[in-house]
Amino acid sequence: MSSHGNLDDIGSPTTAASVAIVSLVVYLALFFLQPILMPLAIAILLYFLIRAPERYLFERVQNSFLSYALVLGSAVIVAYLISVVLYDNLSEFIDQIPEINAALDEKLQRYSEADLYGFEAIFSSSEVVSRIASPENIEKFAISILGSVGSFMTTMGTVLLFLVFLMLEEKTLPDRFKSAFPESYERVRTIVANSSESISTYVISKATCSAGQAAVLAILLSPICFDIPGWFLFGTLCFLLDFIPVLGALLATVPPVMIGLIVLEPGSALLMALFLVGNQQLFGSFIEPNLSGSRLGISPLVLLLTVMLSAQVWGIAGAIIGVPIVIIVRLALEEDERTRPIAMMLAKAYEEE
């Protein structure tokens, strides 16, 4: 069957109705089965993330249980240490809010009385500017993000349970599936292999680049460089939000720039903003594509819709894990000739073999 025939089939009323019904069922399942599906999705992503270091340790200790235990134990210790430093830095930022507000009022007063070629009228409307650059609003934004992350961290018991069973089933499940569904085994094995490779590459490269970008941002904001209050807090937000494509990097950069405009002189604030944008572009446009080999392979419009829909259903956690899910969906659709046109529409670019 030709690709034109496939496109005609997908455009038929019956196929369109089927796609609409399946989409509705999937949406309802994601919404009403969130307590089960979200921990499972997080567990799958964690599984792909820890496989590389686990394989590295397994080659040396020759014990799968020990290698997994070392990786998970190290991850728990690192997460605990980060949470301690984050809590202290967040508390320090909250304590400094009155000083930041005083600096904002002083700067607004100074600029409203200066000759800025007509732009001083903007600063004379101090109430409007104060609302936009309010440290309290930045605090609420940061706490809401951390609160959303903390809310799904409370499901870590379920996540770890799923993760343990994924590790236990990784060797026996393929053989059982082959015995139960011999006709579908090869096609499913291809989908799983392609998905595993793509998701592993995406998760590892994304985590590496997000951590690198967050570390550089935290150093730039720390007392070593520009001494911005909440430097570790903003570094943590950068790491988390960078997992959200399209909008995440922008959301991570705006709050520290706003604080910098308040507590720094204009020249220093501009220099800091240039460094932050350069850091974002370095990791997002050069380092990450080289690590992953290519971009996500998903249309930017599909990415944006995925982020918005998954965030609406599962919050910030959904915005983070929605992209790997749509990658798996595209790869699965691509393996069936009947659904390949849908995969072509989801892809950023499609080349026929």
Image: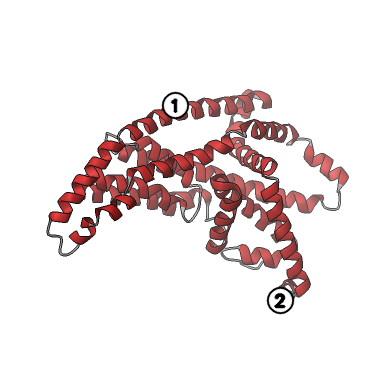
Task: Report x, y in % for residue 26.
Answer: 71, 55
**Mark drawn on residue 84:** 1
**Is residue 243 or residue 48 the one in the foreground?**
243
Amino acid carrying label 2: it is: His
Task: Report x, y in % for residue 12.
Answer: 75, 75
Amino acid carrying label 1: it is: Val
Q: Quadrant of the N terminus?
A: bottom right
Colouring style: secondary structure
Going 48% across and 42% down the picture, which residue do you hit? Answer: 145
Disc 2 is placed on an element classified as helix
> Who comes first in sequence, dot 2 or dot 1?
2
How crowded is the residue under tag 1: few (<14 C-alpha within 10 Å), some, or many (20+)? Answer: few
Check contact, mark 2 vs mark 1: CB within 8 A. no
Q: Quadrant of the C terminus?
A: bottom right
Task: Report x, y in % for residue 30.
Answer: 68, 50
- Is residue 171 left or right of 136 when viewed as pictured? right
**Is residue 353 or residue 125 the one in the foreground?**
125
**Mark drawn on residue 253:** none
- Is residue 48 left or right of 287 when viewed as pictured? right
Query: What whole-number distance in Å separates the C-alpha atoms at marks 2 and 1?
Result: 58 Å
Identify whether 120 is placed above or below 5.
above
Q: Dot 2 corresponds to which residue?
A: 4
**Is residue 85 or residue 44 the one in the foreground?**
85
Disc 1 is placed on an element classified as helix
